[in-house]
Image (cartoon, rainbow, N blue to C red):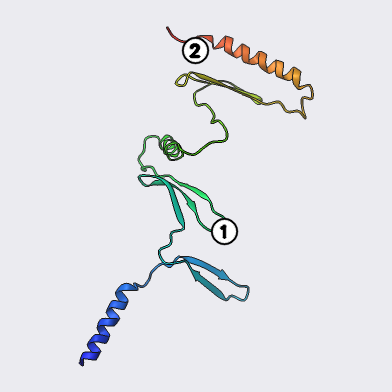
Amino acid sequence: MTLEYLELLEDMKKHQETNEVPRRVRGSLLVRGDDSYEFTPYAEGESTQEVLRQRGKSKIYRTKGRQPLMVAYLTVPADAVDPRAEILEQADELTSDMASKAQPKLRGTVLQQDSDLRITLSKKERKIEVTFGIDLNLTPAYNNRLITIMQRISQCFAINQTSLVRPR
């Protein structure tokens, strides 16, 4: 074997080490009607995610592209006692710094709930949340309906007075 042949073999080995096969290449594939393909690779090393917050394996990130999205990736152990609670806790922690336009629903004991009224008591926060709605298509006399709902709220407070009074 000549020296040139050995150098050529060495160069081929280096090239194979840097370009492993098979490998994944990020990009977009365009399939045309005539079954021809056009693959456009993304720039090498460019991430499609912009991580906003991360906690362990869970994270919230923003995607890049024509239609950017905000994605929440939440993980819990398979043997978790209450996986739903852990997922909600992670979501709360990851989104704690994000501004909310609407007030979140109060978590606690639901004192009354039906089609147009919901009354929730949170002993932890010492708050009561009253949510009601009046369908103007069904109730054109919305003033009368509002008074009826207010009476039902007052009645609910009277029934649950012992749980609403602060213990001394």
Residue that protrudes farthest toward the bottom in the picture? 2
Question: Residue tagged by mark 2?
Answer: 163
Query: What whole-number distance in Å separates the C-alpha atoms at marks 1 and 2?
Result: 53 Å
Q: Reply above or below: 135 against 49.
A: above
Q: Position of residue 122 (x, y in %)?
A: 49, 21
Which of 124/87 is in front?
124
Q: Is disc 1 surrounded by few (<14), some (14 to 19) or many (20+) residues within 10 Å?
A: few
Q: Reply above or below: 42 against 120.
A: below
Whichever of callouts 1 and 2 sits on the residue coming sooner in the sequence is: 1
**Disc 1 and disc 2 in contact, CB within 8 angstroms:** no
Q: Is disc 2 surrounded by few (<14), some (14 to 19) or many (20+) residues within 10 Å?
A: few
Badge 2 marks a residue whose secondary structure is helix
Q: Is residue 51 left or right of residue 161?
A: left
Q: Residue at x 43, y 40 (%)?
A: 94
Q: Quarter of the image containing the N terminus?
A: bottom left
Residue 66 is labelled as 1
Which residue type does callout 1 highlight? Arg
Displayed quadrant of residue 139: top right
